[in-house]
């Protein structure tokens, strides 16, 4: 019979509503701080009106959960964004815009935007799965407690057998 004990590792602060599990040795080699434009996202009270105008100008508008987007690339991102901003100004629309890139942070945001799984895998630069996993953090931003279960593994000594991040306490659901 193996002996286990649970210990507090500390807390993790969240300001983006998401967390990431990754081996730190890959941060410098696999994490892309800079990225190339892949889409112009827009959202706000008048996003549907803006979408109709853009569709009439032959743009392909993708309707996501809470925002819309137009795919772009390095060559046309600034031109598309300038056109969108002109339409917003000329029509007095309440819409915000953002250029999304293929950098690692934007990739994590896309992964955690999945409303069913609320997270998923990150891939190495060469395309294979296993770089890490990203997921939403409970009710969003905050300070979350992290625990480790330490297991006696015989001649191997004590080892961390699992890690638990408490994102939602049961008493938070009593409302």
Image (spheres, grey):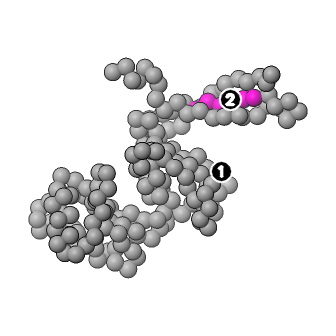
Q: Residue furthest front?
A: 116
Side (left or right) of 96 relative to 34: left
Magenta span covers which residues?
146-151
State which tag comes first along the sequence, 1 or 2. 1
Determine the residue positioned at 34% across, 78% down.
Answer: 76
Q: Residue furthest right?
A: 155
Percent across and percent down for residue 12 are 54, 37
Q: Residue furthest left?
A: 91
Mark 1 crowd level (few <14, some 14–19, many ≥20, 10 Å Cα): few
Determine the residue positioned at 29% across, 77% down.
Answer: 79
Answer whether residue 16 is visible to the viewer in this image.
no
Side (left or right) of 35 relative to 55: right
Q: Which residue is mark 2?
A: 149
Determine the residue positioned at 66% across, 34% down.
Answer: 162
Question: Is residue 148 shown in magenta?
Answer: yes
Which one is in front, 23 or 11? 23
Q: Which residue is mark 1?
A: 23
Tag 2, which secondary structure? strand
- The quarter in which the N terminus is drawn is top right
Question: Is residue 34 shown in magenta?
Answer: no
Mark 2 crowd level (few <14, some 14–19, many ≥20, 10 Å Cα): some
Alpha-carbon span between mark 1 and mark 2: 19 Å
Percent across and percent down for residue 175 are 33, 21
């Amino acid at each position: 019979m193996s002996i286990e004990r649970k210990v507090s590792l500390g807390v993790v602060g969240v300001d983006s509503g998401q967390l990431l599990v990754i081996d730190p040795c890959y941060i410098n080699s696999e994490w892309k701080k800079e990225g190339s434009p892949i889409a112009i996202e827009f959202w706000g009270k008048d996003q549907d009106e803006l979408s109709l105008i853009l569709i009439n100008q032959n743009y392909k508008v993708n309707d996501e959960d809470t925002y819309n987007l137009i795919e772009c690339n390095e060559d046309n991102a600034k031109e598309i964004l300038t056109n969108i901003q002109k339409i917003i100004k000329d029509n007095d629309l309440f819409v915000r815009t953002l250029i999304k890139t293929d950098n690692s942070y934007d990739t994590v945001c896309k992964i955690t935007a999945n409303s069913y799984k609320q997270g998923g895998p990150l891939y190495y630069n060469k395309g294979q799965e296993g770089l890490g996993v990203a997921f939403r953090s409970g009710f969003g931003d905050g300070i979350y407690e992290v625990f480790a279960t330490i297991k006696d593994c015989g001649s191997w000594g004590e080892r961390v057998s699992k890690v638990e991040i408490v994102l939602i306490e049961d008493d938070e659901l009593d409302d």
